[in-house]
Amino acid sequence: MSRSWPRMVLLVLGAVVFLFPFYYMLVGSLQSEPDTSLAGAFPTGGFTLDNYVDINGRVDLLRSLVNSGIFTVGVILCTVVLGVLAGYALARLHFRGGGTLFAAMLLVQVVPFQLLTIPLYVMIVRSYGLADSYLGMILPFAINSTAVFIFRQFFLQLPEDLFSAARIDGAGELRILWSIALPLVRPALLTAVLVTFIGPWNEFLWPFLITKEADLQPLAVSLANYISSVAGRAANPYGAILAGACVLAAPAVALFVVFQKHFTASDIGSGVKG
Amino acid sequence: MTMTATTTGPASGGSASRGPRRSALTALLGRHPLGIAFAAPYAVFLAAVFAYPLGLAAWISFHDYFFTAPGAAIERPFVGFDNYTAVLSDPDVRRSFLNVLVFLVINVPLTVVLSLLLATALNAAIRGRTFLRVSYYVPYVAASVAVVAVWLFLFSNGGLVNQLLGPLAPDPSWLVNSKAAMPLIALFVTWKQLGFFILLYLAALQGVPKELYESASMDGAGKFQSLRNVTIPGVRPATTLVVILSTITGANLFTEPYLLTNGGGPNGASTSPVFVMYQRGIEQGNPDVASAIGVLLVIGVLVISLVNKRLLERG
């Protein structure tokens, strides 16, 4: 099987197509003059960090990264605490409205979020006055439904005997969840955190709509503002833009490379096969 | 990502009811009333962030609605289908819906074919499998804004792609060419999302029984025949899911027209409904018209999804 050449050629070609833009992003961010020739993609010298200094002068990188971090950590915290509770209830507890909630969880995943931006904008910015605040940024993303689904699937896989035994011993549900179920589904926790992370970290439209103050903008927004404000100019702003792009892409890519074991077909499969 | 999930209800558990009063309460709240407390925050979240805004969008779309300061009480008269007639007769809106159709016609088949092909190839026991799998989903996990930056660079007028194409480069260049802009966005999104769909197909391929392949090859089926007769029928539920999810991605399109083609350019050749929604609703302060676009888009997505589901599951 492993000696099939057409297959290997296809796979390697695929990898090149997927990875080359990232390589090019890094190379472009390290060069003082953009060289768009083919040879320019494989430079042998002339590396510089000037572009990073340059983008840092136009966009406060540290401030933007902190904002992205607060936005992302807020969402992850809400998802892990409230999402685990919901996932546990949906998997192991029998309560009124459980079936409806489960159906709603599935339905929500096919509602295109961007379509809700106008009413959400009316509610959060106009009615509650939460523009330019972390709370307003976090609120629409607070509990990631895919993560709730992953939690539910993992809790569902635990043997029922475990729970009935604990209940006979008089353990309360919160205690069962905390000391028995949660330690057993730790891999699910990591998968759910990974899946949740890319939402707010990469999100552009929502924070773009509700943050007008540069001090509060996540990096995706401040970088996009920089890109669209220099796009018309004739000068060569690519180095700085690519440097910013590297800073924005690196944390997510690094996380998924390091924890790749927790983001595989079987993890996603639990979300598909049900 | 859960269209095909089986709807197993909450698992039963706990001891049997004790006494008549207990069972009355059980009938009302379920065997574990605590579950209501556990699930309440999530239920409230779904109601506040999905159900209510959906209703609000529909309500706004039937009224003459405008932005006011928080707390201001202003009458917003009911206007029937006025906003919808305004939207449907707006050439910019029509253009954006047409653009999404172009997008879907390119993006959906390409996504299905490429992700199934790569997933099948990746499913075999091969060297460097982990490396390949990870490199396929790197674009998926990276921020759109970041990868748009490289594509801007790659596909700019004097960019690497045009350098390689030489005289074959389109004129005007990709991002400012009204015929190439939307197809390029479709390619970009296919490239960006493919890794996720490869994972979906990989998961689905685990569920195709190995014996089917064995008996197919016993019957003398070649690789393409077993792909056609075993793999494709075996992963049909995943295909339905991939088609529906990529349709939704198309309906959600905003960042790419906003940044990659500098605001849906050239001359609106790459606008998307969400982009027009943003222009009308936020920039020009007409949330009523924007909501009507949103409602039409939700209906469109639902119709396309249902038709796809029917066609694919019957096929």
Image: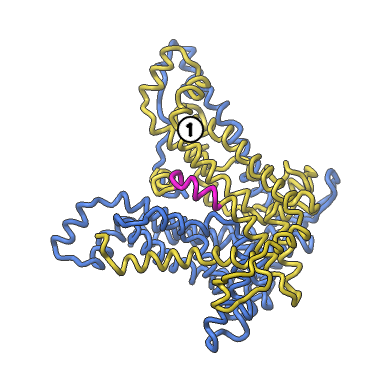
Name the tint of chain B in the rendering. blue
Q: Is residue B99 above or below residue B162?
A: above
The chain identifier of the residue carrying mark 1 reads A
Amino acid carrying mark 1 in the image: Leu
What residue span does the magenta drawing correspond to? Answer: A253-263
Report whether residue A94 is seen.
Answer: yes
In the rendered view, would you say A136 is above or below B275? above
Residue A110, how many percent across, how many down?
Answer: 52, 51
For chain A, the rendered hue is yellow
Q: Please tell me in which quadrant of the rendered image residue A55 appears.
A: bottom right
What residue did someone put label 1 on? A90
Quarter containing the N terminus of chain A: bottom left
| Residue at 19% over, 52% down | B211
Q: Is residue A129 left or right of residue B268?
A: right
The kind of secondary structure element at disc 1 is: helix
Instruction: Identify the residue shown where x is 77% and y is 62%.
Output: B283
Instruction: Please name whichever residue, B197 or B274, is drawn nearer the observer in this view of the structure.
Output: B197
Q: Is residue A104 visible?
A: no
